[in-house]
Image (spheres, coloured by chain):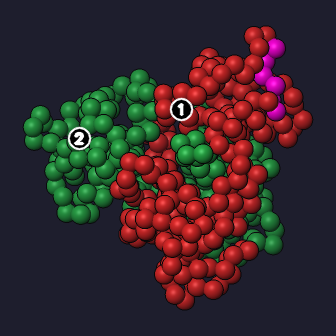
Chain colours: A red, B green
Amino acid sequence: MPANKVPDIVVGRLPLYLRALSQMARDGKEITSSQELGGRLGISSAQIRKDLSQFGEFGKQGTGYNINFLMEQLKRILKVDRVWDIVLVGAGDLGTAVANYRGFVDRGFRITAIYDNDPAKAGQPVGQFLIRGTGNLTEEIRTQKIKVAMLAVPASEAQEVSEKLVKAGIEAIMCYAPTSLFVPDNVRVQYIDPVLHLQHMTYYLPE
Amino acid sequence: MPANKVPDIVVGRLPLYLRALSQMARDGKEITSSQELGGRLGISSAQIRKDLSQFGEFGKQGTGYNINFLMEQLKRILKVDRVWDIVLVGAGDLGTAVANYRGFVDRGFRITAIYDNDPAKAGQPVGQFLIRGTGNLTEEIRTQKIKVAMLAVPASEAQEVSEKLVKAGIEAIMCYAPTSLFVPDNVRVQYIDPVLHLQHMTYYLPE
């Protein structure tokens, strides 16, 4: 598989395709086309065909895509044909909302622990979890060989926490803090910052 | 200004530049370079210079960028040299976390109301707000000429709510629900779905 050759922007669209296909499958559909998929996502059908062609032949000219088959292929490519354990650091409002979110597990992820550095919070329940102190965070994550973390701490603490996570062997960090992390090249970071999205849209609004 | 000619992907990077520059300014820096900015963001300096050149001349060869000046220009381009009123729909865990987030106002946004369709929640406090019922949502938003909304409702309700928002004159929707909205062409939608980001990263993780 030409894993390292596919542009990152193409990789980033695959989860969108998978999500739209899952929605179609839930609606009882069995077959779709790049036109229909593109219509749902605001992406051209040519772009979708080109993106998918980087990974193989998933549909036949004129007959479209078998939705379940294409979903299975995308899950395999994105490595979510398994379930990844995640640790969540930060048990404030946002961390609590993330911990209670039930949309992870059927899309390849399972939160296994939630940490907070506030000693007063240690042992308190959040959803189905008891908050853990960060004292043994590095050792606990390393022992469990967890590779994925979500960071819901204030921006001022995010860098320090990310360094502990990297030391623990974490290779993928989803960062909710509105800041840029400095991490080694082998560690991926994705950011969720609602203001970036809002500012992206106001550009287009009339004065 | 060539507002409609700039590729959307370039527009999407401007908020990132603005955020990194704001961080530098808070750290007391006055001048930066495309190299330094790129180093913080994992974007090449050539890309940054090319992106910025679409909007004008913001730095001099060899002397770099004046951080405050470039921030002012980016704020003007992104139209966040003002404060936009936002309504938030959905007062569950996530809506509550968003309502309590204090990082909006100094970046161009102010939540002015939070709505929930659960009658039991109407009148309850969330942060500094009292939750409003959705009965008069369309009229209230239209009267106040609000253009920006955030959607923190379940996926199953998102489309219906978005149609009310569009009817109310909303032109920019930030959607936290893991679904794709169908909206008219004049309405922009940005999605925040943590699973999309997680799946984007697992692609790169070792088996």
Residue of label 2: B34
Please identify the residue farthest to the left as the structure is shown. Answer: B62
Q: Would you identify the image quadrant in which residue A125 lies?
A: bottom right
Which portion, as a residue range, is magenta?
A63-68
In percent of the image, x 37 and y 41: which residue is there? B14
Residue of label 1: A3
Q: Is residue B92 left or right of residue B99?
A: right
In percent of the image, x 58 and y 28: which residue is there? A1
In terms of secondary structure, where does tag 2 sit?
helix
Q: What amino acid does circle 1 point to?
A: Ala
In terms of secondary structure, where does tag 1 sit?
loop
Quadrant location, the N terminus of chain B: top left
In percent of the image, x 75 and y 71: which residue is there? B122
In the picture, the disc for residue A19 is: none
Please identify the residue farthest to the top as the structure is shown. Answer: A62
Q: Nearer the viewer, residue B76 or A151?
A: A151
CA–CA distance in space, label 2 to label 1: 30 Å
Q: Position of residue B168 (x, y in %)?
A: 67, 46
In percent of the image, x 63 and y 71: which residue is there? A113
Q: Residue A64 colored magenta?
A: yes
In which chain is the residue bearing label 2? B
